[in-house]
Amino acid sequence: MPAWLATLLTIVQVVAALGVIVLVLIQHGKGADMGAAFGSGSSGSLFGATGSANFLSRATAMLAAVFFVATLGLAFAGHQKPQAAKSIMDGAKPAVGSDIPDSRPAAVGEKPAAPSDIPK
């Protein structure tokens, strides 16, 4: 998985998490409905008395789903093993024969390499 995709998934996950936090904090609890019955003013909200609860619950569920999918994507990206870096030597053919003179010192009784034998 490309690095830019993992970065994008991380950004989506953080934004979705912050959105879920904000939406959960905005929503009223179960006990808030009792106050609305006695005229606390929540029925005059933008979505109406029940409209805001419906909209906020659906928006929270959608952001939670986006968060879940982003988390699964990041888990999948983290589970893959990184590919080994290719080396330019992977395609090189092994040296065959004695084209390259020995760099070891001459043994007793051997003739040392002549300067003309050493490649330039």
Image (cartoon, grey):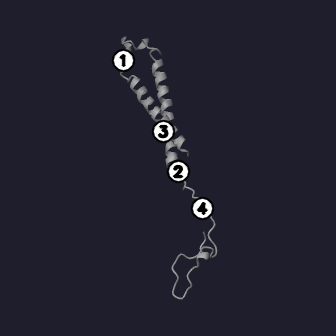
Q: Secondary structure at mark 3?
A: helix
**Where is residue 3 drawn, in percent x and y?**
53, 44
Residue at 56% in and 76% down: 102
User: Are dots 2 and 3 in contact, CB under 8 Å?
Assistant: no
User: Which of these two is toward me, 114 or 65?
Assistant: 114
Q: Amino acid at mark 3?
A: Thr
**Residue 10: which numbered mark, if any?**
3
Mark 2 and mark 1: Cα distance apart in space = 52 Å
Q: How far, Cα to Cα, is label 3 from label 4? A: 35 Å
- Residue at 45% in and 29% down: 19
Which mark's residue is nearer the viewer, 2 or 1?
A: 2
> Which one is closest to the eye, mark 4 or mark 2?
4
Q: Is residue 97 above or below residue 8?
A: below
41 relative position to 99: left or right: left
**Considering only vertical position in the picture, is 53 above or below 3?**
above
Query: Quick check: marks 2 and 1 in contact, CB under 8 Å?
Result: no
Location of mark 1 (residue): 34
User: Do the residues bearing badges 4 and 1 touch, measured as CB atoms within 8 Å?
Assistant: no
Q: Dots 1 and 3: beta carbons under 8 Å?
A: no
Q: CA distance from mark 1 to mark 3?
A: 40 Å
Question: Counting residues from the N terminus, which is met first, the one under dot 4 or under dot 1?
Answer: 1
Looking at the image, residue 11 sits to the left or right of residue 116; the answer is left
- The quadrant the C terminus occupies is bottom right
**Image quadrant where residue 26 sits:** top left
Residue wearing tag 4: 90
Mark 2: give few (<14), some (14-19) or many (20+) Cα within 10 Å.
few
Reading the image, the residue beneath label 2 is 80
Q: Which is nearer the N-term, disc 4 or disc 2?
A: 2
105 shown above or below 10: below
Q: Residue at x 48, y 33 (%)?
A: 64
* Residue at the outermost bottom position: 109
Q: CA distance from mark 4 to mark 2?
A: 23 Å
